[in-house]
Amino acid sequence: MNTIPPSASFEYRPAEPTVVDRHRFQLEHGIIGRSTEILEIVDTVRQVAPTDITVLITGESGTGKEVIARAIHKASKRAGRRFVAVNCGAIPEGILESELFGHEKGAFTGAVESRKGYFEIADGGTIFLDEIGDTPISTQVKLLRILETGEFMRVGSSEQRRTDVRVIAATNKDLEQEVRARRFRQDLYYRLRSVNIRIPPLRERRSDIRLLVEAFLEEGRRKDPSNAIRLSEDALSALENHSWPGNVRELRNLIESLFVLERDKLVDAAVIYRYLPPLEPGESNRPLPIALGKTPEQAERELIFRALWELRTGIEEIKKLLLPVVMYSPRALPPSGNREIAEKPVPEFDDSMTLEEMEKVLISRVLAKFNGNRRMAARALDISERTLYRKIREFGLS
Ligand SMILES: Nc1ncnc2c1ncn2[C@@H]1O[C@H](COP(=O)(O)OP(=O)(O)O)[C@@H](O)[C@H]1O
Ligand SMILES: [Mg+2]
């Protein structure tokens, strides 16, 4: 006779993931967000982490692809072993294969010793192949092989080696399009995308912005508890309405800058707009900012701030046009920037300078004006960021 009450069988059922479990997981792995998109991603991560399945993470730069990759590793049985992150896009083509698979002594000029590659170093752990879309076709064949069989050969060797590595790949490229353009092997693509986690850009999950801001402020306070910086309600709305082309990374950088440069202040929307990059010409045609659950007064105030900001952008353009003329009369220059950096002596122009010296002064002034933000400085100077970096190095500017 069965004496166990039927309800007892419930105890043997694996527990359904609860909201609390999910929240705890997010805390543990530093995944901030409560949008349905993020919650779905968290659930997928929790499902795939314990397996060895290959995961492809796609999303724009700064959306958190590496955060997710690390969470998968940390929640897997490989957590105690290495997580090796390789940026396939940043390693020159000529040495990528020897970096990934290792090489034997004498395999090429300069190979004075044999060396393990990342796949061997990561043995037992996880390898994170970042920017996989930038891998040359010739290397892709070898990646496919190692994914399918775990086998590879060091450069300059014909000995088969084996490694036990879980692969997580990421890209901000549309791999399907890369396949169509024959820059990416279809078979590798199919192999990689067994599980595809797509992280939407921040502008498509604006409800996460406040949480992220709070978390980054909290992080700042932990490092510097005496800083009493606060953000006003309209500052938060301004952040919520921005398009964030650099996604969470851009938001984090902005909060870190505010923390340092607006120490102890109550930051409002006008201040926020000073930190956001000026709008591109023609960008003012974009749809008006969406007012998320705002009173009409708040929404109107934001629109006014926006309008003022665009006006300011126009003035910047005019200043840029006038700058070559103003350059020769230092007194006519407005004080550089409107923030506390004015304490630092700002280099001045004078008539005896060579063109090169003037260029150096101009660059340091513009950098100072944008608090060292190179992207904004490059934009104001109308040169590429790359050129600006080169000049900074050339002139020994910091
Ligand atoms: N959901 C998130 N929660 C907390 N921090 C995040 C999140 N997404 C991104 N970040 C932070 O944003 C920055 C960029 O993230 P990262 O994973 O390097 O982006 P990607 O690899 O997509 O370029 C990092 O500082 C990261 O900590
Ligand atoms: Mg990254």
Image (cartoon, helix red, strand yellow):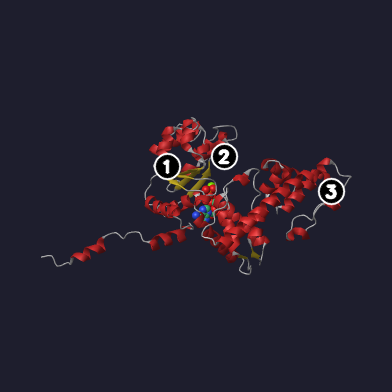
Give residue 88's mark. Answer: none
Disc 3 residue crowd, few under 14, some 14–19, many 20+, Cα 10 Å: some
Question: What residue appears at the point 77 percent right and 50 percent down from the top-left corner?
Answer: 365
What residue occupies the far top of the structure in this picture? 182
Q: Nearer the viewer, residue 95 or 210?
A: 210
Q: Residues within 10 Å of mark 1 (few under 14, many from 20)?
A: some
Q: Which mark is residue 91?
A: 2
Query: Is disc 1 placed on a helix, strand or loop?
Result: loop
| Amino acid residing under circle 2 | Ile
Residue 2 lies, in percent from the top left, at: 13, 65
Instruction: Name the amino acid, label 1.
Output: Thr
Residue corresponding to mark 1: 163
Image coordinates for residue 357, horizontal then vertical, percent: 82, 44
| Residue 165 seen in the figure | no
Contact flag, marks 2 and 3 (Cβ < 8 Å) = no
Q: Which residue is mark 3?
A: 349
